Image: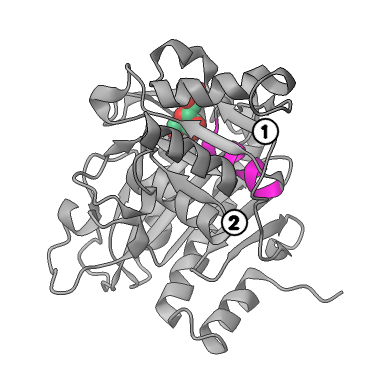
Amino acid sequence: MSRITLTQFLIEQQREQKHIPADLRLLIEVVARAVKTISVYVGKGAVAGLLGNAGTDNVQGEAQKKLDVAANELLLQANEWGGHLAAMASEEMEMPHPIPHGYPKGGYLLVFDPLDGSSNIDVNISVGTIFSVLRRPEGVTETDESAFLQPGSEQVAAGYAIYGPSTMLVLTVGTGTHGFTLDREFGAWVLTHSNITIPADTKEFAINASRARFWEPPVKRYIDELLAGNDGPRGQDFNMRWVASMVADVHRILARGGIFMYPLDEKNRPNGGHLRLLYEANPMAFIVEQAGGAATTGREPVLSIKPNKLHQRVPVILGSKHEVERVARYHRES
Ligand code: F6P
Ligand code: MN
């Protein structure tokens, strides 16, 4: 049986398409190896004694799960020694993580959410890992927080792993969005979904509707029209899904279309939104746009925002292009 593995796919991107240099290929392979290990721990569930809280809070004031901490450590350790990175940053760490003395340093920055949707771990629902790769800016020797504050349009690679019934790695290096499924027996990532395309139209939406009373008028208008279904201005019924794991909701949208929204609302306005720009919104926006979808805050494209801090939060509306454009238009009209 002839199968294209992640390694083959990346070598081809490097050799024939000249899209990625060798050290970026190595970086992606190291991340892919680390998420394979995370997948093993996630899959063991209660057997590994890794469910439940770690007893600590992260910089965002969220209670860390034992698996949040373990996944963060695995990603740091796997990526420290390879020589391809200048620094790493993570949802679980207040400040960037420098490459320890004694290891060679490279030209890339890696940012990640080690375990997205981690409130779902204890109830055995899909969680994931999200990552984004930036270049270390020219002339920067000491890699501090400011090196990471680049708009999402500067990303050279982004991806996520989803730990679901099967484990998948969805990746872009700017040449489309491609999905690999983990063959657990062989330990290989097999290209199973090349050139993923999100349908431009959809009848499915994802939003935490318990916050409806806090939404801004354009979001209220849009969702009210969807809820009115066949009898409303859209003249058709829509269906709703909300996993509360961004990876799982975005993965469904890549598979069959849909719109995902965590908009600005009265309650999250003081923070600028709910989801984090550098390791949630930006990588997902890159992946979705490379699959023909769109991503906006309602007011501007996610990928054009110049970040002002590492853990900055933003509103996120992404998925099927025509619906995302409609929500952006409702924002302009209001
Ligand atoms: O990482 C933040 C996150 O857990 C996302 O994975 C998810 O989409 C969202 O927050 C869930 O938010 P809520 O708790 O409001 O449903
Ligand atoms: Mn997350």
State the image coordinates of residue 328 (x, y, percent, origin top left): 44, 39
Tag shown at residue 170: 2
Whether residue 265 sits left or right of residue 33 in the image: it is left
Instruction: Please report the bounds of the magenta region as a residue range.
Output: 245-255
- Decide which of 29, 156 is in the foreground and name it: 156
Identify the residue shown where x is 56% and y is 19%.
Answer: 224
Q: Is residue 49 above or below residue 81?
A: above
Q: Amino acid at mark 1?
A: Glu
First of labels 2, 1 by sequence position: 2
State the image coordinates of residue 50 (x, y, percent, origin top left): 53, 30
Report the magenta stretch's main SS. helix
Q: Are marks 2 and 1 in contact (CB under 8 Å)?
A: no
Q: Secondary structure at mark 1?
A: strand
Q: Secondary structure at mark 2?
A: strand
Tag shown at residue 204: 1
Q: Amino acid at mark 2?
A: Val
State the image coordinates of residue 212 (x, y, percent, origin top left): 47, 14
Name the residue furthest bottom. Answer: 16
- Decide which of 216, 70 is in the foreground and name it: 216
